[in-house]
Image (cartoon, rainbow, N blue to C red):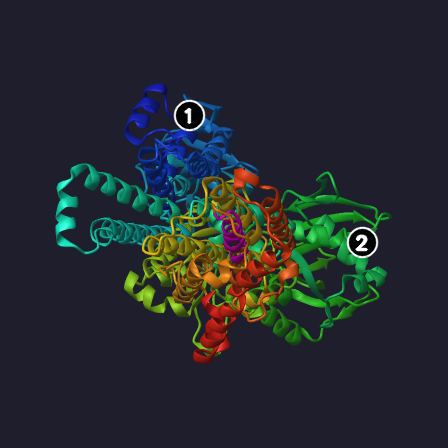
Amino acid sequence: MVKNDIKKYRGLNEKDVEKSRLKYGSNVIPPGNRKTFIRQYLESFGDPTIKILLVALGLNVIFFIKNFNWYESIGIAVSIILATFVSSISEYGSQLAFEKLMEDSEKIKSKVYRNNELIELSITDIVTGDFIHLEAGDRIPADGLLIDGEIDVDQSALNGEMKESHKTSAIKIDYEESNDKNLLNPYLLFNGCIVTHGEGTMLVQAVGERTFYGHLAKELQEDNEDSPLKQRLTDLAKTISKFGYLGALLILTASLFKSIIIDNNFNLIQIAAYISNPYLLIGDIIKAVTFAITIIVVAVPEGLPVMITVVLSSNMKRMIKDKVLVRKLVGIETAGSLNILFTDKTGTLTKGKLQVTKFISGNGNIYDNMFSLKEQKEFWKMIYISSVYNNSSKLGYDGRKRKAVGGNSTDRALLDFATTYPLIDVNITKSSTIPFNSKNKYSLTSVKGDVDLTLIKGAPEKILPHCTNFYNSMGVKTNLTNIFNINKLVKTMSNSGIRLLAIATSNNKLNTSSGKFSDLTLVGIVCINDELRQNVKYSVQNVINAGIQVVMMTGDSKYTALAIAIESGLLDESKNHIVLTSDELNNLNDDEVIKLLPYIRVIARALPQDKSRLIRLSQKIGLVVGMTGDGVNDAPALKKADVGFSMGSGTEIAKEASDIVILDDNFLSIGKAILYGRTIYKSIRKFIVFQLSINVCAVGISLIGQFIGVEMPITVIQMLWVNMVMDTLAGLAFAGEPPLIEYMEEPPKVKNEKIINKYMANQILFTGIFTTLLCILFLKLPNINNMFRYSSKDNFIMTGFFALFMFCAIFNSLNARTQRLNILSYLWKNKAFVLIMGFVCIIQIILLFCGGSVFRTYGLTFKEFIVVLSLSFTVIPFDLMRKSYLRLRNTKEEVAKFL
């Protein structure tokens, strides 16, 4: 239907509104399946390591009800509660993104034609078919068609592009709901965008979740897949379960073999008599089962969930000092596992604000330093007058300083530039103004006072051809003779992605209806650019050196995007790197995109769905994906990514959807987050090596001890202290491991890589076996026993054993924290480790001499103490030999990458 057929503008009546609402829905985005905190908390018990702990706790209660090991049970229960509670608090905050989106939307008011009147309604009352009156400053409340007037629209909330989009009224109008979501369509308007200039009327064609904005909000409600750490912990849980079950089966078999075969001297008659006695047989079976279940409980590293929570939480505090705020704990570790990082340009690589960066005078001089312009007083006066009085922006105050407000982004940049060195003695008044619009590409203002001129500002191709003079450095008109060089500079600057604005004056009254000028005097060419952040090239290179592919996604044109990518060091044309536009990307099927993905470095004119698609395809091929962003348009991609980085100055929705907030908006801080992530993952692995080595020792002693007359030689009270050291205190100690720059030179971990690799398994197995043999030899060798005082209940040898076991663990913590031969390497950078392990040593010595019957410790002589200390110290040279052997078989770099 043609536009002129529209009634001017009667609008819908109440019956029409209800009919439309029933057919197309309301202008609200329905909530998804929101989870309460209690539900989040209950779901956290599905974590694989938590499941193992629950089984261990249940077995501990059921089978040891008679002699209830409440210390072990309380320790496991506390581990479960702490790990699940902290995790739930973190995850519960992630659904606030959608709630924030709804809260912002409901505050919007719009001017709507209803029942022959123009009234103001809440955005939630708008329906498909409504006519909305729009003017500068209004936020567009729904998707629709501009049917009257011309407006400029800021669509940066949806596409990230700072340049306003010019919209004109449509020639033909469709009253039905439209599925067209092309932001570049000159007739379509979209919910969430801001009108910056002009006035018009919009016909609403889509509301609520059917809008472009609604699709973004809906994506925020989708659940993410498990993080790489959670997937690795799931595999670890399976491995630990197998180890525990295998150990339990071996001990069950060994215990029954001892009771049935060995204790009956391999005599078939005695064995038959034993089996025929059900009381003896059942008693020994129960004893064997109980012993096997004890091993399952001992084998479970109940400190692991708590340690992970501790190491993530403690590093959160350290990261805040580096301007990195972690919203979701697991996001820290995931950052260290990144394979590919999709980054926004505006506000991330660049400062996020248009600024005048250069000024080209009429004689071809390029000014980078604006202070030198100010020194040329008469020339600066002409620049100042042209910039301030032919400008739609005004000076405002943001609570800290005066700044340009209103108008478009170009005018604000120009006004901020001019008022850097304001002139206070200027007597100028405006007599008439023709504002800038995208069609004419210029603005005019006639002024009187100190000068009587017409000020012209616009696109260079509109202004330069009509300039015959220019102002020299003294502010005097001079013949313009080098227009060829000026045009050449303009072309060069334009091709490098810089926005250019020519400013000129005229003594004549201009004929604006024809759009033609003559005899203009050029003031200069203003170069406006969203500059790269300081050190961004170094920051990008640092991330690339870490083996992470960085892809810039921007709403800017291909030429602008290419210029920024080259300047920031993202793109290397010698390496077959590719720049694609959104249209080019959408012309490729998924298989073609996956094939090109390793070479893609820039996506220009990027739309939110492009970001989500690339993230989905990257995850499909097993990559750990990161995404940076600051706008509403980035929120779905931030949520879909394995780890989302939002900017501190970005929208609240982007922050809520992200895992990590970069407080200083600096790409350098993203590199720091990646370094912390890698450090944390290494800390977790070091803790696992430390704890499982002791667990292997405990299981080994239990397995072998039955055949040599050694029961589990550690009491329940002693085990409480052992668990405290192995779990809480060791977790705190390893949590403080320093982030080393060398970690950024390692390639990222493969997403499906197991948390326990070959190097770790080697260390756990050999250290566990060595300490097991050491402990058994300590208890059984007469030569060692004779070094300790005699006691009918073996009080002193068992005191020595408790000391041996604990000091082996303490010395082994030094082995576990580094793969270097120098076990003291960077030790003093982890002061917490030194203090905690020092504290453990002091308490252990006190317990040895003051524990008494409670801890079954009766003190040691100096000689006995030196013997224990010397034997336990042997775990260090043993591990050094193991490390040296591996270095002989592998290069230093190959060994280093294992941890």
Q: Residues within 10 Å of mark 1 (few under 14, many from 20)?
A: some
Compared with residue 238, is residue 537 higher up or lower down, i.e. above or below?
Answer: below
Magenta-highlighted residues:
794-808
Task: Identify which residue is drawn at 43% across, 46% down.
Answer: 639
The answer to which image quadrant residue 483 occupies is bottom right
Q: Is residue 614 above or below residue 104?
A: below
Give the left or right position of residue 624, taking residue 839 as reference.
left
Q: Residue furthest right?
A: 425
Mark 1 falls on what kind of element? helix
Which one is in front, 45 or 723? 723
Looking at the image, residue 354 sits to the left or right of residue 246; the answer is right
Please indicate, yes or no, whether residue 199 appears anywhere in the rendered image: yes
SS category of the residue bearing label 2: loop
The label number, if any, that marks residue 811 in the structure image:
none
Residue 10: % across, % down: 40, 25
Q: Which residue is mark 1?
A: 125
To which quarter of the image does residue 218 belong? top left
Compute the Cα span from label 2 to label 1: 48 Å
**Which residue position holds label 2?**
421
User: Quadrant of the image for the N terminus?
Assistant: top left
Looking at the rendered structure, the kind of residue marked 1 is Asp
For residue 610, say whether it is visible: no
SS majority, magenta: helix
Q: Report the front residue among 1 and 492.
A: 492
| Residue 687: image location, x then y, percent | 49, 55
Q: Position of residue 748 (x, y in %)?
A: 45, 64
